[in-house]
Image (tube, coloured by chain):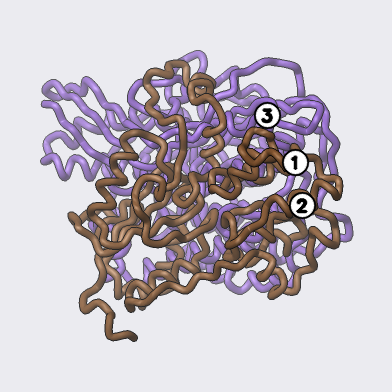
Amino acid sequence: MSTPRTFIVKSLARVEGEGALRVRVDGDRVEIAEFNIYEPPRFFEKLLVGRAIDEVPDLVARICGICPVAYQMTACRAIEGALCIETGPAIGSLRRLLYCGEWIQSHALHVHLLHAPDFLGYESGFTMAVDHPQLVAAGFRMKGLGNRIMEVIGGRAVHPVNVAIGGFYAWPDEVAVGDLVPDLEWGLSAALELVEQVSRFDFPSFEPRQEFVCLRAPDEYPFNDGRIISSDGLDITVDDYPDHFEERQVSWSTALHSLRIPSGRPYAVGPLARLNLCRDQLPPRAAAAAARCGLDWPVHNPFQTIIARSIEIAAAFEEALRLAREWTRPTHPPRVSHSPREAEGCHATEAPRGLLWQRYALDGKGLVSGAAIVPPTSQNQARIEADLRAFLPQVLPLDDSEATLRCEQLIRSYDPCISCATHFLKLTVER
Amino acid sequence: MTTHAPRTRPRVAVYKFASCDGCQLQFLAAIGHHAELVSKIDFVHFLEASRKVEPGPYDIGFVEGSVTTAHDAERIREIRKQCRVLVTIGACATSGGIQALRNWGRIDDFVAAVYATPAFIETLATSTAIAEHVPVDFELRGCPIDTGQLVEILTALVVGRKPRVPATSVCAECKANGTVCVAVARGIPCLGPVTQAGCRAICPAHGRGCYGCFGPSDTANLVSLNLHYEAGGTPRSELIRLVHGINAWSPEFRAEGDRLAGTGEDDRR
């Protein structure tokens, strides 16, 4: 795990917030298509240096209010790997349950309130609720259930406090876990219905050729474990990630662009990648929904990610239901202790938006001496730009506001982040 | 209802500065569960939720995030002019947030450590609270904010009364929960005695110390608390890291961090 190597400590540029798109077109030819993210950087990788390893889960959570668990899980596993800590099956199950909660709340919010309005012709979930009250109400209830799982296991829905290096600070209340079951049963059936609803939407015809990247675990749909695989045949351990992917800075973005080595080509992470590559590992009812939804797998149309995301809501409910039913409070402590040593470790997990990779260097006093974090949205950013470039000729005949809306809808397909995901686009067309 | 209740629905704007979006998410969670309250509010500028943006001025503006760029320092002044009442939400907006840890370092080091071409990156040397730039009418603390407190503020603003948000410490919440004190019983350094209530004391309830998400409470005595922890054997370096957390740049935590590190004016004791 810990072959000594040096790496540059980079501060993480947040990719949430407002962005812009700059396009230059010469006739039908797209000369420039820049997806500009100008969220101010917060320098997380630098802030982590000198902090005690036990503080890391609380600190990295703050990178993202929508997927704090993804940052916490990845950090815990990377640091536990560096310290050779084995946490065992009970902690693993609880982490998976916690992660299910995060997927549910993140996906349900995006599908119902951020992305569906594009397909149904509304400016927001609020206005959509007037004509589609049940859809919006079901979305809020699903999101609330995801949050409830995070509260029961993590102590809080945004920035959970119960996640620790080595496990959890406390086992969750057994009764509270059991009480989740009836609601999760409703959630599963509601999500299966949602898959049918969104599969009836109209989708622009757009099939860019792309490489999909995700984790693949031996015998379960990927959350916290697995090798990194791709639709082009990549199959590597998480340790080998830097040999196959690189981040490049571009002048128009505070987010770094990720590209494949050696091709220099963009790639896609997220629900579509996971379903294209790990569909056979879905739990049974979600698998049946994926087979029935009318999609011809593998799917290359990014607009149809809303269906993939809905299938994953069902999968997360189905998994959460199984885990909650099976849960019994172990007799051993909730946390494996650790002692400091100089080491390095990296890990990757599947955040709602896709692969999240982190690496930590630790010193002999239990402090972080270096950190690197590659979030899913920066990995998707180059892919988004490539999609825009390929998609623009289709929308150029439309007027600017309609063309803008279509480009927004395309970018929202990637759920780049919540504030990116709505009204972020200032389209400047230079004709 | 008071007689001062506005006759029309207040027009509300929600803004984001440097932040994680978590407080806006709490906003959405509150909206999802309080439809009747929301029906009395007109969200006319809320980019996270809607493409529709109506021009100001607005009755109430909510601001998430801290000021970290020259452009944002200018933007918050414009927003202040547009909003009759300005409410800051969350640790970033009320104290500069976790990203304010840069305020103790050299910003060039931070940028160069991150980006191959630092010249492209526009950032201020500091991350600061909104109130350091413009007058703020009400601050809602927390990382993230508590949805219950947010609903109380929205309700108070809709009916035209003063919001009721407790200024007591986390200790009061532990007592209310019946949680055994982790500092007294287990010797864990806990910021509960000096941190404002609002989180429902979830950290001690999980057997760990408070790490100060809600910032300093009224009349917080950090020096006395940390002298106690130091006497109990907690290394000074650990105490520095504890106050150099989510609300490190709040005046109280900042002064204590500097005192402990021996860099502040209060270093003599």
Residues tagged by mark 3 and mark 2 found on one chain of the structure:
no
- Decide if residue A217 is on the left or right side of residue A111: right
Residue A33 image label: none
| Marks 3,2: beta carbons within 8 A | no
- Residue under numbered circle 3: A360
- Decide if residue B207 is on the left or right side of residue B97: right
- Decide if residue B195 is on the left or right side of residue B126: right
- Residue under numbered circle 2: B189
Q: What's the chain of the residue with tag 1?
A: B
Residue at (67, 70) in percent of width and height: B172
Residue in front for this viewpoint, A241 or B25: B25
Query: Looking at the picture, does residue A374 appear above or below residue A259?
Result: below
- Residue under numbered circle 1: B238
What amino acid does circle 1 point to?
A: Glu
Residue at (65, 22) in percent of width and height: A240
Chain (purple): A
What amino acid does circle 3 point to?
A: Tyr
Q: What's the chain of the residue with tag 3?
A: A
Tag 3 secondary structure: strand
The percent coordinates of residue A357 (x first, y second) are: 59, 32
Q: What's the chain of the residue with tag 2?
A: B
Point out the image quarter for the N terminus of chain A: top right
Residues tagged by mark 1 and mark 3 found on one chain of the structure:
no
Residues tagged by mark 1 and mark 2 found on one chain of the structure:
yes
State the CA–CA distance, disc 3 to disc 2.
Answer: 26 Å
Q: Nearer the viewer, mark 1 or mark 3?
A: 1
Chain (brown): B
| Marks 1,2: beta carbons within 8 A | yes
Figure quadrant of residue A116: bottom left
Residue at (48, 44) in percent of width and height: B96
What amino acid does circle 2 point to?
A: Pro
Q: Which residue extends farthest right?
A: A331
